[in-house]
Image (cartoon, rainbow, N blue to C red):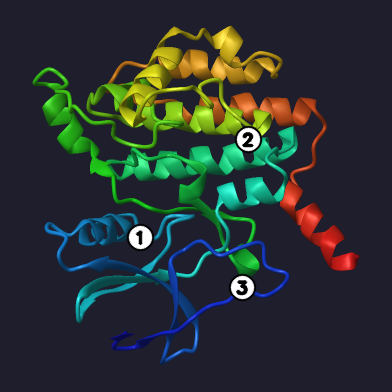
Amino acid sequence: MMCKHFAHCSFEPPPTSIGFSNGELGTNIDTGEDVAIKLEHVSIDPSLLKGEADVYRSLSGGAGIPQVHAYETECEYNAMVFDLLGPSLEDLFNFCRRKFSLKTVLMLAEQLIDRLEYIHSKSVIHRDIKPENFLMGVGKYGNQVYVTDLGLATERRDAQVKANTGRARNPHLIGTARFASINGHLGIIQHRCDDLESLGYMLLYFLRGSLPWQGLTAADQTQKEELILKEKETINIEDLCEDLPGEFAAYFDYIYCLDFDEEPKYSYLRKIFRDLFVREGFDYDHVFDWTILEYLRATQ
């Protein structure tokens, strides 16, 4: 497949690479730089990929937002060409034996709250916050977290209008069951507080290795989603954050008290975790758990 200035090619990660999770790899013919290519068959109508490309462009220029270089249709596929990124947080989580240290989680939390504040400031709600959808950069941006997979993103203005008609429900889960907000399960139109609720679940997942609703036995996927929702609705914050620093309970206390259309105080949420970071005596040196493991592996 050829997209004018971009050539499609195969990719095999080098032996020292943790992983590659951004779709197909291509090369900019003019500059020789590697890029990522996301494909969608033209039979999908309306095109989800075009909507995603439009959202990326609306967020262009923000820290941790991949640049879209082209969106074109070639043969039977729509193709979005964008910045090549590194492994996802889920890839890195597996690489680190499915547990991150408190220091790594707090450094990630700082950037992740920043990313959500930015996309929310552009009237975008992500609606699918999960580790697979956040990727680390490459090269000199290797310590920077990027927001990806905006296919389920929606505009806050739309949510506002619909909210005024009674917060209409959708019969289907929007998002990923493990990390979806309660509103996401109920099909209630989501807002900024829902992205932050999902982020909170993700931080607990990184610290613990799993969430209380993982491993539930169900007859089918629908019943499993219902059981997960029931667990999220009934578990109290103390049990959800058991044995973790109190700052995580404070985070959820704040999120759960937000009104549907209330603007979160992102600076307050950052301060909660910054204070914990300082109290623990950590050094903000951008040395994550996988940085250490990669170094040890390279020196052996």
Tell me the residue that label 2 is attached to: 206
Labelled disc at residue 169: none
Under circle 2, the secondary element is helix
105 left or right of 119 in image: right
Residue under label 1? 60
Q: Could you tell me the amino acid type at mark 2? A: Phe
Is residue 96 placed above or below 199 in the rendered structure? below
Q: Is residue 229 above or below residue 18?
A: above
2 or 1: tag closer to the N-terminus: 1
Label disc, if present, on residue 13 of the rendered structure: 3
Of 25 and 84, the residue lying toward us = 25
* Quarter of the image with the N terminus in it: bottom left
Measure how far apart labels 2 and 1 are at the Cα level: 29 Å
- Residue type indicated by callout 1: Ser
Q: In the image, which is nearer the foreground, mark 2 or mark 1?
A: 2
Q: Mark 3 Cα within 10 Å, few/some/many (few <14, many 20+)? A: few
Drawn side of residue 73 relative to residue 62, left or right = left
